[in-house]
Image: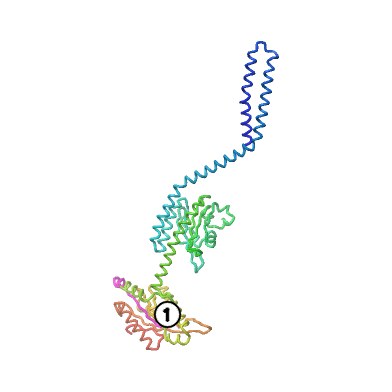
Amino acid sequence: MILQTNVSLYKRNILISLPFLLITSVILSLHPKGGPLFLIPAAVSIVIFIVVCKIRTFIISQHQGEFENFDEKINILNKSIEEKNKILNSFPKKSERASFLFDISKSLIELIELEEIFNSLIKILEKLFPEADSILIFSFDKEGGALELKHSLKRKFNTIKEKKGSSLDNWVLHQNRSLLIEDITKDFRFDASKLTAYYERRAHSFVLSPLSVGRRSLGLVRIESQRPGEFSLDDSRLLRNVCDLGVVVLERSVLFKKIKELATKDALTGLFVRSYFSEYFSRELKLIQRQNGRLGLIMLDIDDFKKINDTHGHVVGDLVIVKLADILQKSLTKRSGIVSRFGGEEFTLLLLEISLKELVACAEEIRYAVAAANLAFRRKKIQFTVSLGAALYPDNATTPTGLIEEADRALYKAKREGKNKTCYSGQ
C-alpha cells in the first residue's frame, strides 16, 4: 500500500514539473544568441522543480498515516458491502425455506405412525439438502441405551454399515446439541481414520442435530457430504428446525402408542386384554373359515392361586402372574397366535393353523415349564402349577363363543381331576 502511494506521489511531482520545463524550453528557443543567458531560466526551473518536489513529498509524508487509515477504512467498508450483498442475496432462499418449514409442519402434524413420520422426514431432508450424499436417521432406545439406524437416504452408496451410530452420533446424543463439521480431517475432536463414513464413503463435511424433547432424546439426524465445507451454519440451524418439528410429532406418536397399549394390554403382564383378544379371535376365525384351516384355543388357570395370595401376600401373587405371562409369551416364539390375560389368574392362547397333536404338545410344554419355574421371594422358593383345557376349530366348535366354552369345560375337568393337568375337549 505504501509503495503504491509513493509511486502515485512521483507521478504527481512529474506532472507539476512539466510546466516549468516547458517554460524553460520556450525561453531557450526564443533567445537569438543563446549563450550563458539560457542557463539562468534553466537553473531557476530546476531549483523550483526540486523545491516543489521536496515540499510536496514533505507534506504527503506528514499525512501518510492518515492516507493508510483511509485505505484501511475503505477496505473494511468494501468487505462489509460484500457481506451485506451476500445476506441480501440469501433473503429469497431463506424466505423459501421458511415457507417450506411451514408446509412441512402441516404435513407432519397429520402423521401418527412412526414409520410414516420417519419416511416423511427423509423426503423433507432430501429436498432441503440436495447436495448431501447420505442422510441417516437414528432412533434411541433408552432401555438398551443404544442408537439404531431407522431410515437412510443413499445417493452414492448401496449400503451404510453404521447401524448403531458412530462417535459423531454419540457426541450429539450425549451433548444434546447440533454438530457442524466443515472437514473431518481437520477437526481435532474426532479421529477421521476411525469413522466408517470417512474411510468407506470419503465423507468430509457433516451436519448433525438431535431429535430431543428437553433432555430426553428420541434419536438424531446425520447429513454428510464428500465435499469439504459443504454445510454452513444456516444449514445447521435449518436442520435443527426440521428436527424440532419432527420430534414433536414423534413424541405425540409415542404417546398415542402408549395410550393404545393401555387400552389393549394388561398393565401388569403386558399381555393383551380380554376385549382385544375377542376382537382378534373373531377376525382370525373368519379368515380361517374362508381358508378351511384350523385354529386351536388353550385356556389355563393358576392352581390354588388364592392360597398363594393368602400364604405369601399379593406381591408374590403378582410375581407368579408375571412369571406365567413370560412363559406363555415364550411359548409363542415358534408359533403364530396371541396370548391374553382373560381375567384374574386365567389366561388364553389362540394358536393359528395348528393340529390337535401340536395343540396338546404346546399345552404340555407350558405345564412343564410352569412346574419347573424358578421363582424366589425373600429367599423362599415359590412353586406353582397350572391346569389347562384345549379345544380345536372346527372339531369341537365353529364359533368363538362355542370354542371358549369347550376349552373352559376341559379346563375345569383338569381341575376336578387333580390339577396340574391338561385336558382336551371331547375326551
Q: Which class describes the residues within 10 Å of circle 1: few (<14), some (14-19), or many (20+)?
A: many
The mark total stands at 1
Residue 19 at what x, y percent from top left? 61, 22
Q: Is residue 314 magenta?
A: no
Say if 196 sits above or below 38 in the image: below
The percent position of residue 22, horizontal first and vertical second, equals: 62, 20
Q: Which amino acid does label 1 sit on?
A: Ile
Residue underneath mark 1:
366
Looking at the image, which residue sits at the far top?
A: 32
Where is residue 353, by image quadrant?
bottom left
User: Quick one: 147 or 42, which is closer to the camera?
Assistant: 42
**Magenta segment, which residues?**
286-301
Residue 406 as seen in the image, left or right of residue 98: left
x, y (%) of residue 122? Answer: 43, 57
Q: What element carries label 1?
A: helix
| Point 61% across, 39% down: residue | 69
287 part of magenta stretch: yes
